[in-house]
Amino acid sequence: MEITKLSGVGVKRAEALAAAGINTVADLLNHFPRDYDDRSNVKTIAELTPDAVNTLRGVVAYEPENASLRLIITKAVVKDHTGTLELVWFNQPYLKKYFKKGGEYIFTGKVRALSYGGADAGPRLQMQSPDYEPSGNGVELSGGRIVPIYTPPKQFSQKTFRALIHQALQLAGTGTFSGETSAFFEFIPSGIREKFSLCGREIAVRNIHFPGCMGEQFRASGTTSPGDDALFLAARRRLVFEELFFMQLTLASMKTAVAARPGLLLANTDYMPFLQSLPFAPTKAQIRVLGEIVADISGGNQMNRLIQGDVGSGKTAVAMAASYLAVKNGYQSAMMAPTDVLANQLYAGFKKIFTPLGFEPVLLTGSLSAKTRRDTLTKITDGRAPIIIGTHALIQAGVNYNNLGLCITDEQHRFGVNQRLSLTRKGNTPHTLVMTATPIPRTLGLILYGDLDISVIDELPPDRQEIKTYCVDSRYRERVHGFIRKETEQGQQVYIICPAISAAVSDGMNTGDMHEETHTQSGSKAEMQNVLNYTQELSAALPGIRIAFLHGRMKPAEKEQIMGSFKSGEIQVLVSTTVIEVGVHVENATLMVIENAERFGLSQLHQLRGRVGRSGLQSYCVMLSDIKNEQTQARMKAMAQTTDGFKLAELDLEQRGSGDFFGTRQHGLPAFTIANLYRDMEILKEAQEAVLKLHEFSLTSEESDAIRRRTEEVSANIFQMREIGVSL
């Protein structure tokens, strides 16, 4: 049923809903609440608690009035059998006509104690800008109950969106729309519902939007939130299971389809020339992972493998070894990096190793001159370029590979799944290797990389020292400056990270950080440090030290020049945004200073810390933050206590939830409408069990068709599997 069939949805509102992915009534009912507000405890006026949010039911005693000072104030007085209360709203003059004398309404808002009427009188109470709706008409959606809180599209307030959901639920109950397009359609077979004790979808959808218990009945049950209500728990469990079940089924189908494809058969080769060219001896973990790669690409099927390892664990060396195997077998190897800075660094590293071995790498980025780009594309097309290092430029139209046998995506969390697949489609079933230095908890990895085989490099080079980590506030900035001078006088180098470019501009590379700022600041007045001002102030504070800045809005050639000067030691202190977050390797850098550390997630702080400690020199990380809230303090304490990226990632996932783990959708993380991977791990296990044992259930043809159609919808929305020819 089209959304425009609902009362109150005109052209503009329909456009706003469509922009949020809501085109039908079923879409609307699948837009679940993000939170709930307990407004079930309706108090009398005499029972109101000052300096707290209260809900009351009262009758408007007099006609409301508007008063104009610097802004328009609308005042109303409500009464019940225990007393009267003044309510005020600011700059909402239309409310004067909304409230009718003698009409009963329900209000929720914060109550303030304004003054005392006398020595024996209590304070005069006032409720400011309360939420409101008529009472006594049998439909109370915003008070007197557990109230759903949504992320409404533009054009909608919480109240209007709530009413629209309620209208859709009423229509659903009349049979106005039904069948597979209904929000109540059962895609999960009855056998699975029975085995895992799942309630029906209609019960789940109705109770997820408006939990059934409310008012005195709710409090009498001893509950304080819908999470304690058995019916609500059953509703949420059903919907979480459904979401994870079809996600896992999609990934399993994708993995099965890829594994069944014949891959390029690469013969094993003598690695000794390559290993002898490395400036270090590989760790046991690197050798083990390389063995897993060799088994894949010499086994006849297409490799689709993730290498996961903490910062500094040596993933790039393993990627080089895989590339060596590919080029020795006559195939090209392409490695895609998320930034020009990292692509240039990888190119320099590959060139140093492979040129003496007779294989000349090429670099392809958007910053190349027209002539250099033409020459590079020609070499890629005719096969003279055996190893290609680049950015997103590798997947652009016009880039034609001669014999692509291995696709490597570095820092995969910076790319979407489709970008990874776009590189793969440049060849004829090439092998795929994905790398990430972002530690991913197993629960999240099962979703994000469920279509890949996973290898973990769980060992650091033996010469690495643990990075000593400290968290201080801005009172210690002078001491930090002294620390910077000490390190530079000893010939070492320093990174300083700021969350913004200037006072008015954030870095395009920094979108995840700015999201995290809104998550953690909670209205804090803490000053946000920025690269440009900080560089000027530090140069004045530390004369004689060579300081430069770097950020994502600089031209690629400028960034390359700055990083080259820093790597050579010409620049002693680099003030930067998180453009240097991943992959940048400067062994002489021993101190990382992170300003406004509260604005970054734990995993990102760990990534930044990993830019130092790249040699045998003792290294340090100093995080500055003036934010004292409990969550920020817990994160800072965790950073100071452990350098284990996987432990930090688990805590990050627990604190921020799976939706915010990487900050933005561009990183390829599926957006969940209701599941929380940290909280719902047990349901995830059940969903995986159901997928693995799906063949054991006696499904009707209708149930099989429903599963297939729903899985195709999920795969098309998230992985665009139809584009890569996966048959379900």
Image: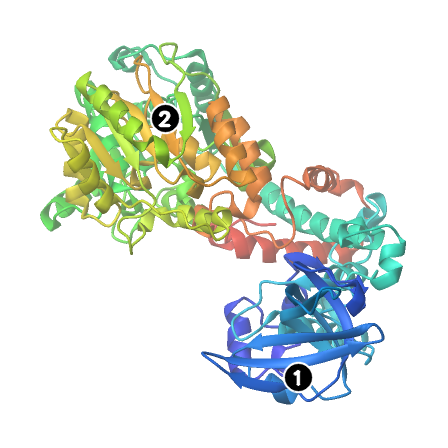
Q: Nearer the viewer, residue 389 or 184?
A: 184
Q: Is residue 557 visible?
A: yes
Task: Left or right? Give the position of 274 relative to 210.
Answer: left
Q: Residue at x 75, y 38 (%)?
A: 693
Amino acid carrying mark 2 in the image: Cys
Q: CA distance from mark 2 to mark 1?
A: 58 Å
Task: Left or right? Give the position of 573 relative to 298.
Answer: left
Q: Decide: is 530 above or below 139.
A: above
Q: Nearer the viewer, residue 437 or 467?
A: 467
Mark 1, residue position? 7
Helix, strand or loop at label 1? It is loop
Mark 2, residue position? 621
Whether tag 2 and tag 1 are in contact, CB under 8 A, the answer is: no
Q: Residue at x 35, y 10 (%)?
A: 463
Q: Residue at x 50, y 39 (%)?
A: 628
Chain-order first, disc 2 or disc 1: 1
Task: Left or right? Give the position of 308 relative to 546.
Answer: right
